[in-house]
Image (cartoon, rainbow, N blue to C red):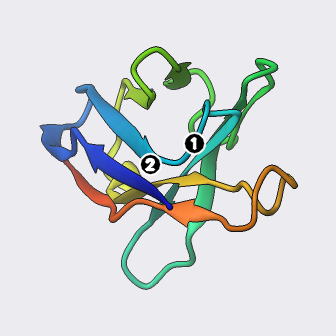
Amino acid sequence: QVQLVESGGGLVQAGGSLRLSCEVSGRLYRINVMEWYRQAPGQQRELVALITSGRTINYADSVKGRFTISLDNAKNTGYLQMNSLKPEDTAVYYCSLPLARYALGSADYWGQGTQVTVSS
């Protein structure tokens, strides 16, 4: 079993920064792929960023140039650095290990989510 715990969310003014962390524990040798999603009230969950251990990185167009995804396998932790935040970035942010979708395991795993609120 694998557990993911996000942290680092909070309330910030527009233009500010936050760094989200996703700590992974359990039966996982290394983090080979991690995704960050977000879901705003009344909206569908959207993929924000993806990183693989092969250093493939993709971002949603809405966050390119502002958000940076990274991995630290020594700490079993992934990060999402969010700069120049906008009110439209307000959402619950989730990290995910899509092991089944990438044929790396038998299941996909999700964290519990962390709230990010950006005031104007």
Q: Give residue 85's quadrant in the image.
A: top left
| Nearest to the observer: residue 4 or residue 49 | 4
| Nearest to the observer: residue 63 or residue 20 | 20
For label 1, the residue is: 28
Query: Picture coordinates of residue 47 (x, y %)?
Result: 64, 55
Q: On screen, 75 above or below 21?
A: above
In the displayed structure, does residue 26 sit left or right of residue 12?
right
Mark 1 neighbour class, 10 Å CA radius: few under 14, some 14 to 19, many 20 or more: few
For label 2, the residue is: 26
Looking at the rendered structure, the kind of residue marked 2 is Gly
Looking at the rendered structure, the kind of residue marked 1 is Leu
Mark 2 neighbour class, 10 Å CA radius: few under 14, some 14 to 19, many 20 or more: few
Is label 2 in contact with label 1 (beta carbons under 8 Å)?
yes
* Residue pictured at 40% horizontal, 52% vertical: 4
Q: Give residue 55's quadrant in the image.
A: top right
Query: Picture coordinates of residue 75 (x, y %)?
Result: 39, 20
Q: Is residue 120 visible?
A: no
Query: Picture coordinates of residue 26 (x, y %)?
Result: 44, 48
Q: On screen, 40 above or below 75?
A: below
